[in-house]
Amino acid sequence: MSGLHTWAGLLLGWVLYAMFLTGTVSYFKDELSQWMRPEAPRLVQLPDQAAVAKRVADEIGVIAPGTTQWSLQLPDARHNSVYAFWRTSARGPGQRGFDDGHFDPATGHKIAARGTLGGDFFYRFHFQFYYMPPLWGRWLAGIAAMFMLVAIIAGVITHKKIFTDFFTFRWGKGQRSWLDAHNALSVFGLPFHLMITYTGLVTLMALYMPWGDRAAFKTPAERQQLTAQLSAFLPPGKPSGEKAPLASIEDMVRQAQQRWGSDHVGRVNATHAGDAAARVAVTRGDVGRVSMSPQYMEFDGVTGKLLAVHDSFGAAAETRGVLYALHLGRFSDIETRWLYFIVSLMGTAMVGTGLVMWIVKRRARLPDPERPYFGFRLVERLNIASIAGLSIAMTAYLWGNRLLPHPLEARAQLEVHLFFAVWALTLLHALLRPAKAAWIEQLWAATALLALLPVLNALTTQRPLWRSLAEGDWVFAGVELMCWALAALHAVLAMRAARQPAGVQTGRKAGRRAPVAVASGEAAE
């Protein structure tokens, strides 16, 4: 079990660390997206969702007439604009087949915001990565999550004194300190780590284990019933060819508000607007509801008549919906979301300390520490780029958001390319520099980038930190204050790394004392 725990955690540990850290940030992806679109107006008070839906639906009818499907996400406490997408007739190579945009809730007009994926980039990267087909990325994420689940279970079996070890921490004891830190981080968040890993697999269970529903749902009608329990997006179907005006979207949303509450409508989806076969689905939002099973009201798009209310599901579908909701945490209020963030950050540190502990433990066994074997050097350098380098790359992504000109063709993709280019440079730096120096330099680089980001924002936008604080704009202020908090954390780690002296250990094969530069392992703390 000890060997299984070690190797299951190591072989995909760098992938898991990236998944954990980007997943942790994703709990505030909507707030980060607001910060990355400073042109979007701040919402001081939530507008009437029904009136907003009417304005934006009318605007989409003007800019995308004849679209077979459109969907809009209404503003709420975490979204200051309306995000909408609609199908287009483009089907050529490199064309997506749909367009999207952000709309001002007050006017219904499209906002000329800078092109960016915002916090959604970290969210998508967390489970499907990038520069590969999404299907491949999701399979890789699933394999990594299964490795994580095995490592957690094997770790619990291995550490027989798991409760006692939680209250034990020996500072400055090298390998022992790393083990104590790893144990404490693991035990404190153990229920969360188990939940988040298992529910992550459940979110894509139909991809990983498709045979059950293939055997159970064979006819098109049965599969349509299954789809209705998993998604509120209506299949477009075939248009009738007979033109007919779309009924009042505002009235449909008001019926949903009467059922769920004035601020609890999430989306409005429409198919074949302007055709006699039009259908509209108004879905309930996620806030305060510990289930991702879609609840929605289906309307005739021409008459506005309520056709069906979908708010009850089978036991299996609802179980999946609850587990899905526990993973995403979208039901949570601000306090619960911070708890998710903190414990998930501890999970990230758990993976990171495990990776570093592998190096610390084996450095003492090297016959010649000045000439470690290839596998040791590979793990050591990947640790530096995966832990310190990822912090630099993620912050560089935010710097790119402020420095790239606006407007700019394919600007959102350039921000992503910058993220990966900087991350690749941190790996090159780790390969070229001595390990201890690489740790220190990259941690200080992350500190500087994080600390100076609020300054950059003040120089490039009309929403500096002091104005955000004065106006009570806690989305903008919160992002920048968190940057300073994380800068302080990285500074502490950099100073800790710099203070680690070269140690002396026993080379087991040599049978004599040999100098060992333990700092490269210790430096990550």
Image (cartoon, rainbow, N blue to C red):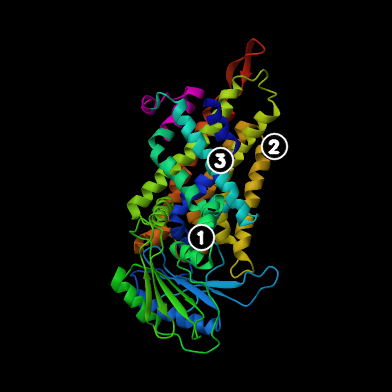
Sooner in the amino-acid sequence: mark 2 or mark 1: 1
Label ID, residue 512: none
Which amino acid does the dot numbered 2 rest on? Answer: Leu
* Residue 231 place in picture, x, y as percent: 46, 64
Residue under the point 60% across and 56% down: 134
Residue under the point 41% across and 37% down: 190
Compute the Cα span from label 3 to label 1: 45 Å
The mark closer to the camera, 3 or 1, is 1
Which amino acid does the dot numbered 3 rest on? Answer: Ile
Above-or-below relation of 291 to 438: below
Compute the Cα span from label 3 to label 2: 17 Å
Disc 3 secondary structure class: helix
Q: Is disc 3 surrounded by few (<14), some (14 to 19) or many (20+) residues within 10 Å?
A: many
- Residue beneath label 1, please? 217
Magenta segment main secondary structure: helix
Sooner in the amino-acid sequence: mark 3 or mark 2: 3
* Residue 56 place in picture, x, y as percent: 45, 78
Label ID, residue 432: 2
Disc 1 secondary structure class: loop
Which amino acid does the dot numbered 1 rest on? Answer: Phe
The answer to whether 221 appears left or right of 316 in the picture is right
Above-or-below relation of 456 to 5: below
Magenta range: 163-185
Sooner in the amino-acid sequence: mark 3 or mark 1: 1
Compute the Cα span from label 2 to label 1: 56 Å
- Residue beneath label 3, please? 387
